Amino acid sequence: MLIGLAFVALVARDRHDLVDIPEGIPPGAGIAVPPIDLDAPGRTAGQLRSWAMDLSPDLGIPIVSLEAYGYAAAVMARSRPDCGIAWTTLAGIAAIESKHGTYHGSEVEADGKVSPPIRGVPLDGSPGVAVIADTDGGALDGDPDYDRAMGPFQFIPETWKRFGTDANGDGFADHDSIDDAALTAGKYLCVSGGDLTSPDGWQRAVKTYNQSTKYLLDVRNAAAAYSVGRAP
């Protein structure tokens, strides 16, 4: 009994010590990504290992996934400084879409590959599901009849064919790579929302993923939690 009471007290104290999740849109930018050589060969995101290792335990985000979000935000800061997308927004979306690449027991490997691959349900018009007939002959999503959302950021084939980007230097834009998917998401969100440092731009960008207000608030809450150094 004493052990049980001590455990309850510890949990209560831990909850009490948590920083409140900030309100407002857009969510904060979080701990700054340190400068890295964006043009280095290979998996450049690995330069953020120390940064990611420091943040990972409190955020509950795999280190490799966190590296990918930081790298994508750094690349977008150089290529689209007018957009202002933060790694926290990418992390918020990935948290909802795939639990940072760990949905249903998947794991993020050291090279950023998510295994086994994460696939959404067939977009066949079932209740609550859109109808999108196959657009890729099943080549990307493995379904020759209907499209499915793919990878840790859940892109459909048509969107991936338009925006898919090689972020890890292996010469291939892979929707099942957390690196490639995070940078692709950054590009997609910036094109869709414009200035993501504004409330209107941020909401417009996130709603390209899902028009649901609940979805937008779930992403906001996750991103805002990460911005103050805690898990949602």
Image (tube, helix red, strand yellow):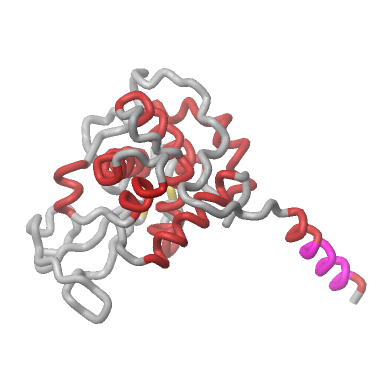
Residue 216 lies, with reference to residue 187, above or below; the image says: below
Q: Is residue 45 magenta?
A: no
Taking the image as drawn, is residue 180 in sight?
Answer: no
Q: How many numbered marks does the figure carry? A: 0
Observer-nearest residue: 87 or 192?
192
Taking the image as drawn, is residue 93 in sight?
Answer: yes
Residue 214 lies, with reference to residue 162, above or below; the image says: below
State which quadrant residue 18 falls in.
Answer: bottom right
Observer-nearest residue: 193 or 69?
193
Q: Quadrant of the C terminus?
A: bottom right
Residue 142 lies, with reference to residue 123, above or below; the image says: above
State which quadrant residue 12 falls in.
Answer: bottom right
- Which residues lie in the magenta part? 3-12
Q: Where residue 59 sits: x, y (%)? A: 59, 48
Q: Where residue 151 sits: x, y (%)? A: 31, 53
Q: Main secondary structure of the magenta part?
A: helix
State which quadrant residue 215 falls in.
Answer: bottom left
Q: Residue at x 59, y 36 (%)?
A: 53
Q: Quadrant of the N terminus?
A: bottom right
Q: Residue at x 55, y 36 (%)?
A: 52
Residue 89 lies, with reference to residue 149, above or below; the image says: above
Q: Where residue 124 sits: x, y (%)? A: 16, 74
Answer with left or right where residue 212 lies relative to residue 221.
left
Q: Where residue 189 sits: x, y (%)? A: 30, 44
Q: Residue at x 82, y 66 (%)?
A: 7
Q: Residue at x 38, y 58 (%)?
A: 97
Answer with left or right where residue 177 lies relative to residue 48.
left
Q: Is residue 11 magenta?
A: yes
